[in-house]
Amino acid sequence: MAMGKKLQGYSSDINVTPMVDVMLVLLIIFMVITPMLQHGANVELAKTKNPVPMEDADKEDAVLVAVTRDGAVYFDTQKVNESELTTKVEDKLNGRADKKIYIKADGRASYGVVVQVVDDVRAAGVDQVGLLTEQINQQNKQQPLPPQ
């Protein structure tokens, strides 16, 4: 008789399946969003064979200046013109012990614009200027075209 009778009441087993589902969804969301979190304007950095690693450029308090392909200059995320850059850098670094600035220049940006930005930043009293680059991927290196 006891075989046919169903147990009345609640099960005390923990069901972790919904929690695992939520955690996997959050993991996917963070994997998609993380590459989009970058400082400053979106630029395609110049590629070099042996770049010097600059881990401080990824910190929250790092001061970044970006130069885009068309010559626009961005201080953090705000577009500025050349006359405003020096004063904005001075205001940002006022009272800081280390006066470092990192410049992200597009690989196809005009050399003259990049030199002018470096000059404006140095005029603001910056001690160290870092030029950010990417390392050339040796495996996907394109072969030069033969002359015709």
Image: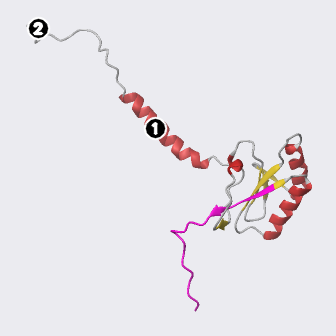
Q: Residue at x 63, y 46 (%)?
A: 37
Q: Secondary structure at mark 2?
A: loop
Location of residue 5 with respect to 29 vertically, above or below: above
Residue 97: x and y in percent read: 85, 42
In the rendered view of the protein, which quadrant contains the C terminus? bottom right
Asked whether 73 or 93 is in front, the reply is: 93
User: Splitting the image into 4 quarters, where does residue 13 fall?
Assistant: top left
The Cα atoms of the two marked residues, 2 and 1, are separated by 44 Å
Residue at the farthest left position? 1
Mark 1, residues whose alpha carbon is within 10 Å: few (<14), some, or many (≥20)?
A: few
Asked whether 109 or 57 is in front, the reply is: 57
Q: Residue at x 48, y 39 (%)?
A: 27
Q: Residue at x 56, y 66 (%)?
A: 137
Our reading of the magenta stretch's main secondary structure is: loop
Q: Which residues are magenta?
A: 129-148
**Is residue 114 found inside the magenta-colored segment of the image?**
no
Location of residue 116 with respect to 77 vertically, above or below: below
Left or right, 44 with respect to 145, comes to: right
**Circle on res. 147:** none
Residue 60: x and y in percent read: 71, 42
**Circle on res. 25:** 1
**Circle on res. 2:** 2
Amino acid type, mark 1: Val
Amino acid type, mark 2: Ala
Location of residue 37 with respect to 147 vertically, above or below: above
Dot 2 or dot 1, earlier in sequence: 2
